[in-house]
Image (cartoon, grey):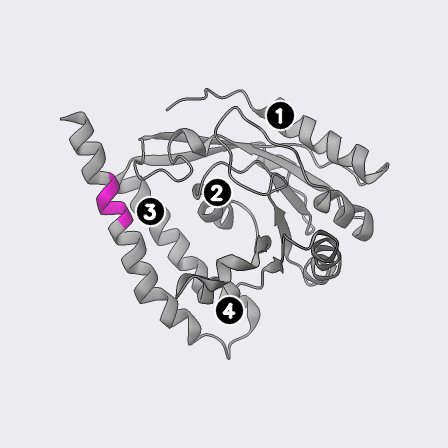
Amino acid sequence: MKNASLLLRSFLFNAIMWTSVLVYAPLSLCTLPLPRDARYRFITQWTRFNLWCLGRICHIRFQVHGAEHLPDEPVIVASNHQSAWETLAFQVIFPPQSWVLKRELLFIPFFGWALALTWPIVINRSARRKALRQILVAGKVRLDAGRWVVVFPEGTRRPPGALGRFGIGAALLAKHTGRPIVPVTHDAGRFWPRRGFLKHPGVVTVTIGRPIPPEGPPEELTARVRASVEGQNRFSTSP
């Protein structure tokens, strides 16, 4: 009976989420003439709606530790990547932001079109040097415009307890702009697994570390950021 309830709740949430994409994405396209910040506020209402549905239907909520570490000025957020959950919740937890994301996401009908209006930093991961240049140039523009930049240095979602190798992009951007990196850890994969249909009830824990200044060679800075993310991760590896 418990498994049947879990399946039903997961199906209902997924149906609502993707139906809402079909409704909200075309409306988001209508915001194109509006200022960038107005577009962002409108589009992220979809995120808030789906997080509310996730809590009400699947009983997945979240708590944040370390919010006092967030600076007042735009910075770079470097987080582990386990789930689709953080792509929703970070829009609520952090100030207006631009993500570093692979260009293939923009090809998804409706969803990708609306995503493009949020002013992301779009990269071609198969062309590494060009991708790094895009992060440096576009990242500085976003930060100077008051946007936070969110980076998932692992590059792809990984299961809980399996922190991957960190790419150097966040460190290079920090060195290029003089902005610190805020390390973030969460355990969303325990409740919303990568490529997982079932959504397990529970409380996602998000831990925000102290900002790491852009000091030392990029490789050393990357290692410090990864060590901080790993050190904040004290979570179980199963739901």
Q: Which residue is mark 4?
A: 38
Q: Residue furthest bottom?
A: 33
Query: Residue at the location (56% across, 59% down)?
Result: 103
- Determine the secondary structure under disc 2: helix
Residue that mark 2 sits on: 86
Residue 125, image x and y in percent? 63, 52
Question: Left or right of 43: which side holds 156?
Answer: right
Mark whose residue sits in front, 1 or 4: 1
Apparent side of residue 109 relative to residue 225 in the rendered image (left or right): left
Kind of residue sitting beneath label 3: Trp
Q: Earlier in the sequence, mark 1 or mark 2?
A: 2
Question: Regarding mark 1 in the picture, which secondary structure is present there?
Answer: helix
Measured in 3D between alpha carbons, the distance from the residue under mark 1 to the one under mark 2, in whole angstroms, is 17 Å
Are dots 2 and 3 in contact, CB under 8 Å? no
Based on the displayed image, in which of its 4 quarters is residue 122 positioned? bottom right
Q: Which quadrant, please, contains the C terminus?
A: top left
- How far, Cα to Cα, is label 3 from label 1? 29 Å
- Of label 2 and label 3, which has the lower sequence position? 3
**166 or 92: nearer the viewer:** 166
**How many neighbours does mark 3 have within 10 angstroms: few (below 14), some (14-19), or many (20 or more)?**
some
Amino acid type of the residue that numbered disc 1 sits on in the rendered structure:
Glu
Q: Is residue 12 on the magenta stretch?
A: yes
Q: Position of residue 167 (x, y in %)?
A: 69, 40
Query: Does the segment drawn in magenta span residue 173?
Result: no
Magenta stretch: give its range. 10-14
Using the image, tell me which numbered label, if any, was put on residue 230.
1
Q: Nearer the viewer, residue 88 or 94?
A: 88
Q: Which residue is mark 3?
A: 52
Ranked by sequence position, the earlier of labels 1 and 4 is 4
Q: Quadrant of the N terminus?
A: top left
Q: Earlier in the sequence, mark 3 or mark 1?
A: 3
